[in-house]
Image: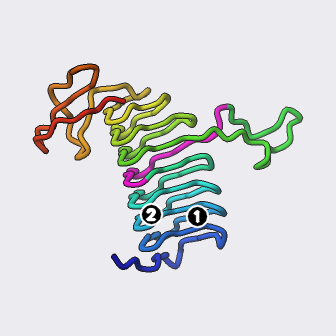
Amino acid sequence: MILLAPYIHPTAEISAQAQIGAGTRIWAQAQVREYAIIGDRCNIGKGVYVDTHVRIGSNVKIQNNVSLFEGVTVEDGVFIGPHVCFTNDMFPRAINLDGTLKSAEDWEITPTLVGYGASLGAGTVVRCGVTIGRFALVGAGSVVTRDVAPHALVVGNPARPRGYVCECAYQLERVREVDGRLMGYCPRCNREYDITP
């Protein structure tokens, strides 16, 4: 496979200290800060903000106006819908105890991980310090405040489990325990799945 140089829209702001993978496309008014790493063949939509030290894998699709703040790691194959916002400080304040404005050194970054193949629907808010498992699906408008298991479907505020999904994102049926393993069936793919965390 021949990998092309990244495409960067003329209005995007990309730090010289950022790493952008081959074949990645970064669209209008996106900003990628210092020491951010974006893998190969990603699509970064209009107005996306990628903060310092954020790590994004390959084959990731990030829709318009997403905010990824320092401490976020996104593995390969993840879909992030428009207007998703990741937080990164469990105890945010604009000022220190003496009333002075906080600087970058005053923030306490809490890491967040989005696992391989997961999808986050439009308008999702992700509280820092959580792990969203492989192939999990977060419904649009959800607020994720705790870990999401692999293949789990979560929705609401706060996001709560509503079932399990296949790698194709269809909801699994006939979810049951078999010999200590959690199994499910995808009616779209016609496959049995082992979704044991």
Q: Is residue 49 magenta?
A: no
Q: Amino acid at mark 1?
A: Val
Q: State the residue at coordinates (86%, 42%).
A: 100
Residue interval drawn in magenta = 76-90
Q: 21 above or below 70?
A: below
Judge by depth and name the residue closer to the eye, 72 or 182. Answer: 182
Residue drawn at x 40%, y 67% is 41
Left or right relative to 173: residue 24: right
Q: Residue at x 54, y 71 (%)?
A: 12
Question: Is the C-beta separation of discs 2 and 1 under 8 Å?
Answer: yes
**Residue placed most toward the observer, 30 or 3:** 3
Say whether disc 2 or disc 1 marks the residue closer to the N-terminus: 1
Count neighbours of disc 1 (C-alpha within 10 A) and say few if under 14, some if 14 to 19, many if 20 or more.
Answer: many
Residue lying farthest right? 98
Which amino acid lies under the numbered mark 2 shown in the image of this protein?
Ile
| SS state under label 2 | strand
Quadrant where the image shows the N terminus: bottom left
Closer to the camera in the image, 46 or 44: 44
Side of 112 relative to 27 (left or right): right
Q: Quadrant of residue 153?
A: top left
Tell me the residue at 49%/75% (across/down): 8
Q: Is residue 192 above or below residue 61?
A: above
Q: Where does residue 22 sit, x and y in percent of width and height?
A: 46, 73
Question: Relative to 109, is 146 on the left or the right?
Answer: left
Residues at marks 2 and 1, CA–CA distance in whole angstroms:
10 Å
- Report which residue position mark 2 lands on: 44
Q: Circle 2: is it few (<14), some (14-19), or many (20+) Cα within 10 Å?
A: many
Q: Position of residue 19 (x, y in %)?
A: 58, 68
- Secondary structure of the residue carrying tag 1 is strand
Q: Which residue is mark 1?
A: 32
